[in-house]
Amino acid sequence: MRKRSHSRRGNVRPVRSLGDPVLRTECDPVRTFDASLERLVDDMFVTMYEENGAGLAANQIGVGLRVFVYDCEDDRGRRHIGHVVNPELVVADGERLVESEGCLSLPGLRFETPRYAHAVVEGVDMKGGPVRVEGTGYFARCLQHECGHLDGRVYVDVLSGDARREAMRAIRGLRR
């Protein structure tokens, strides 16, 4: 299990699996910045660490709000830990890297997934203060992945051709 470095308390919530409609529904913006939002962020961190994830979007635990948390390294080995409320992916550029990617909502499956090597997300923190997060390498991949969740997409949606067909066969095999 990943070392927990986020000091907040929270409760583990069940992670929703592909097939749950909440994963295919665009999330609503957060409009109320209060203790319930802070509890949600705490629960998301605890759940992400319990599941050994690098990121977690609110809809993955059944909450249709635009929030994600993360704890992952960039291409220089620097660890990034945080959360973004009402995130918007404002930059996804640079080289397109095809690397193995997984998702807590598709447990046990990993596919070679194309992502940009650089990403920038803008939003706010749980108090409503502005946040700008810039990532490279694996962290850029994480930012793109989590923003996709909040738009009602999962990572296999960016696959094409043989990779997509392989992913769909594997997903159908999970449902049997």
Image (spheres, grey):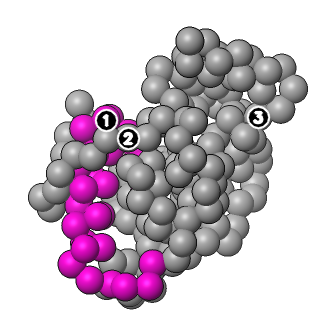
Say which residue label 2 marks: 15
Q: Residue at x 38, y 41 (%)?
A: 15
Q: Nearer the viewer, mark 2 or mark 3?
A: 2
Tell whether label 2 touches label 1 (CB within 8 Å).
Answer: yes
With respect to residue 53, does 161 lie above or below? above
Q: Is residue 37 magenta?
A: yes
Residue at numbered disc 3: 159
Q: Tell which tag, 1 or 2, sits nearer the viewer.
A: 2
Q: What range of the chain is rendered magenta? A: 30-58
For marks 3 and 1 on the same chain, the one whose residue lies earlier in the sequence: 1
Q: Quadrant of the N terminus?
A: top left
Disc 2 crowd, CA 10 A, few/some/many (<14, 14-19, 20+): many
Nearest the camera: 69 or 17? 17
Residue that appears at 57% across and 36% down: 19
N-term-proximal mark, 1 vs 2? 2
Assign a secondary structure to mark 1.
loop
Q: Nearer the viewer, residue 161 or 175?
A: 175
First along the sequence among labels 2 and 3: 2
Residue 152 percent coordinates (x, y) = 63, 54
Q: Position of residue 95 (x, y in %)?
A: 76, 48
Q: Label 1, on which residue? A: 51
Quadrant position of residue 85? bottom left
Numbered label attached to residue 20? none
Question: How many other residues sit within 10 Å of disc 1, few (<14), some (14-19) or many (≥20)?
Answer: some
Q: Left or right: 139 with respect to 89?
A: left
Whole-angstrom CA distance, mark 3 to mark 1, is 24 Å
* Amino acid type of the residue that numbered disc 1 sits on in the rendered structure: Glu
Query: Neighbour class for label 3 at 10 Å: few (<14), some, many (≥20)?
Result: some
**x and y percentages locating residue 79 in the rendered image:** 36, 51
Position above or below: 160 against 125 = above
